[in-house]
Amino acid sequence: MRIMLTGDSLTHGFNTGVLLSEFNIINKGIYGDNSEGIKNRIGKDIIEHKPDFLFILIGINDFALGRSIENIEVSYREIVKKAKDFLAGEKIYITKLLPTKNIENRPNSAIRLMNERLSILAEEEKVKIFDLYSQFADETGNLKDDFTDDGLHLTPKAYGVWSSILRSKLEALISNN
């Protein structure tokens, strides 16, 4: 089974070859990427790598570029529609955006609202939601202190938690196929 992760620096920094070496994971995270970048390359990436499952985590850099939630949602819909040209909806997972340390141009209030919109989009498009947010947010809704050094990017501990959650999900997918 081939799994593809696509996204920005958060995905790029996820060393799946070490943390999830028992799985065939293609990491297509690109540092600094945004939803427009994914939209423009998603079809090519799927054709090239032929994944059985796709996990998308993108959008945090869109906020830094000044894009509105509505604009990001439009891009996400286009990403999902393109992905569905190659994969069945139940094989596509939208990962909820991770919180930050409430970075000014990436505020958690906008991230929470975007995650609500992503959940609705997933339901409408009949794709799946992969929730890392609830494990990464502290009691105030910020990224947990020990999960980041700069308020945005993840520490090895955070990647360990992500890998544990993803491992459980992948084991369940394998047992159901």
Image (cartoon, rainbow, N blue to C red):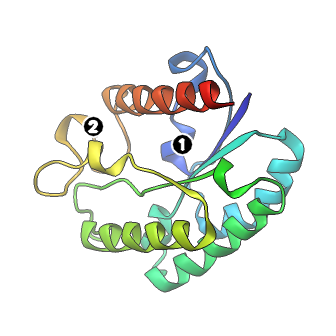
Report whether residue 15 is seen. Answer: no
Q: Amino acid at mark 1?
A: Thr
- The structure residue drawn at horizontal position 67% and vertical position 65%, both measured from the top left corner, is 80
Q: State the SS at label 1.
A: helix
Residue 173 picture quarter: top right
The residues tagged by marks 2 and 1 sit, at their Cα atoms, a distance apart of: 14 Å
Residue 46 position within the rendered picture, expressed as x and y whole percent measured from the top left:
81, 49
Three-letter amino acid code of the residue under disc 2: Phe
Q: Which residue is mark 2?
A: 147
Q: Secondary structure at mark 2?
A: helix
Left or right placement of residue 74 versus residue 96 in this view: right
All told, the count of numbered labels is 2
Q: Height in image: 168 above or below 46?
A: above
Give the mark, 2 or 1, whose residue is nearer the N terminus: 1
Near mark 2 (Cα within 10 A), the count class, few <14, some 14-19 or many ≥20, is many
Whole-percent x, y for residue 11 in the image: 54, 42
In depth, the one of 109 and 171 nearer the eye is 171
Residue 146 seen by the camera: yes
Question: Which is nearer the eye, 162 or 31?
Answer: 162
Residue at 77%, 66% (x, y): give it: 82
- Rate crowding at label 1 as few (under 14), some (14 to 19) or many (20 or more) other CA atoms within 10 Å: many
Which residue is disc 1 drawn over?
Answer: 11
Name which quarter of the figure residue 109 lies in.
bottom left
Q: Is residue 60 above or below residue 149?
A: below
